[in-house]
Image (cartoon, rainbow, N blue to C red):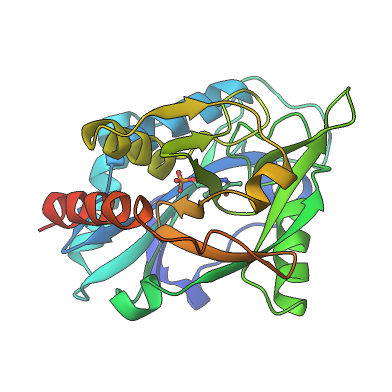
């Protein structure tokens, strides 16, 4: 893994970050992540748009331009030779003595990691098993902050229960459950030929792969509905799948140990093909 921190570049294990970085003590920062294939970054513009929205949401004023960040990412990619990489970048508010409030003129710290990843199609096509859990996350779930402890614990519980991902749900005022998203993915279902996914209100991260999935559905002439849905609806859907920019789309075969979505994959397969083909074409 190649690491970058405020202009320094090294192998990740050799990179030192000051303990006074507010990311360390407060998780005071935001990030974004995608992947690159053949040195080309997938959906970079959309990831940068979201990154700039995340910074604005937490009042971090970047000390770099969009063009400068783009050049940093592309330059780092010229140092690596493998086929595919995960690209992660984050900005923290800055460095200073530990105090909750912050100076408005703090100088942000920019960090980047470029990590090799495998593009094994067999692995990408593996079935995913999910578990559900009450979503106790903060009111900033629509912002890509580095405060990921609830997500970390949810992913850990999934691993300990030998499944692949945790799906969060909230309790609505009327007592219904409302599926929000996975610990690191967005969740979607097909019902009667329609693609149904949670709306991008403040309860979920507006996933870039989610956006590409909706475009794929529209281009395939598949009706799309962005609306709240319950855990029970998810469990009785015709097909269920999860998306993220580093895994694209994965089909779900069980939730809480109950088989789901195995009627057929008539919609998932063309959607996934469209997404992967688009990604491969963009990074050829
Ligand atoms: N939801 C959460 C909580 C995530 O952390 C992620 C990705 O990291 C996603 C959804 C998927 O977003 P994207 O498609 O932009 O990778």
Q: Is residue 197 left or right of residue 218?
A: right
How far from the left and from the top, in percent, is residue 50? 44, 31
Q: Residue at x 67, y 47 (%)?
A: 23
The answer to whether residue 4 is left or right of residue 152 is left
Instruction: Count the numbered circles shown.
Output: 0
The answer to whether any part of residue 150 appears in the image is yes
Q: Considering the image in quadrants, where does the C terminus appear?
A: bottom left
Q: Position of residue 30 (x, y in %)?
A: 58, 40
- From the viewer's perspective, tell me whether residue 82 is left or right of residue 97: left
Q: Quadrant of residue 68?
A: top left
Q: Position of residue 103 (x, y in %)?
A: 70, 23
x 23%, y 37%: residue = 220
Q: Position of residue 22 (x, y in %)?
A: 70, 44
Q: Relative to 269, does residue 95 appear above or below in the rendering?
A: above
Residue depicted at 76% across the width and 29% down the height:
139
| Residue 218 position (above or below residue 284) | above
Quick one: 197 or 57, which is closer to the camera? Answer: 197
Image quarter of the N terminus:
bottom left
Nearest to the observer: residue 264 or residue 74:
264
Q: Is residue 84 above or below residue 263?
A: below
Side of 225 where 237 appears, left or right: right
Asked whether residue 110 is in view, the answer is no
């Amino acid at each position: 893994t190649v690491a970058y921190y405020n202009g320094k570049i090294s192998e990740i294990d050799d990179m030192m970050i000051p303990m006074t970085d507010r990311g360390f003590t407060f998780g005071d920062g935001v990030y974004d992540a995608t992947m690159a294939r053949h040195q080309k970054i997938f959906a970079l513009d959309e990831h940068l748009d979201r990154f700039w929205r995340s910074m604005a949401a937490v009042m971090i004023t970047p000390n770099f331009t969009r063009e400068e960040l783009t050049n940093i990412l592309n330059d780092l990619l010229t140092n690596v030779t493998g086929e595919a990489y995960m690209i992660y970048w984050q900005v923290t508010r800055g460095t200073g003595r530990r105090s909750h409030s912050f100076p408005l003129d703090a100088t942000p710290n920019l960090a980047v990691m470029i990590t090799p990843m495998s593009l094994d199609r067999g692995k990408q096509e593996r079935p995913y098993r999910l578990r559900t859990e009450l979503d106790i996350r903060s009111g900033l779930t629509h912002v890509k902050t580095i405060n990921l402890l609830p997500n970390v614990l949810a992913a850990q519980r999934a691993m300990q229960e030998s499944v692949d991902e945790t799906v969060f749900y909230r309790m609505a005022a009327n007592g219904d459950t409302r599926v929000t998203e996975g610990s690191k993915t967005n969740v979607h279902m097909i019902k009667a030929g329609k693609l149904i996914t949670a709306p991008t209100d403040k309860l979920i991260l507006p996933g870039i792969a989610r956006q590409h999935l909706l475009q794929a559905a529209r281009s395939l002439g598949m009706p799309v509905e962005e609306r709240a849905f319950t855990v029970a609806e998810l469990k009785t859907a015709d097909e269920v799948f999860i998306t993220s920019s580093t895994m694209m789309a994965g089909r779900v075969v069980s939730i809480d140990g109950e088989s789901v979505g195995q009627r057929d994959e008539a919609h998932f397969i063309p959607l996934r093909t469209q997404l992967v083909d688009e990604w491969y074409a963009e990074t050829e």
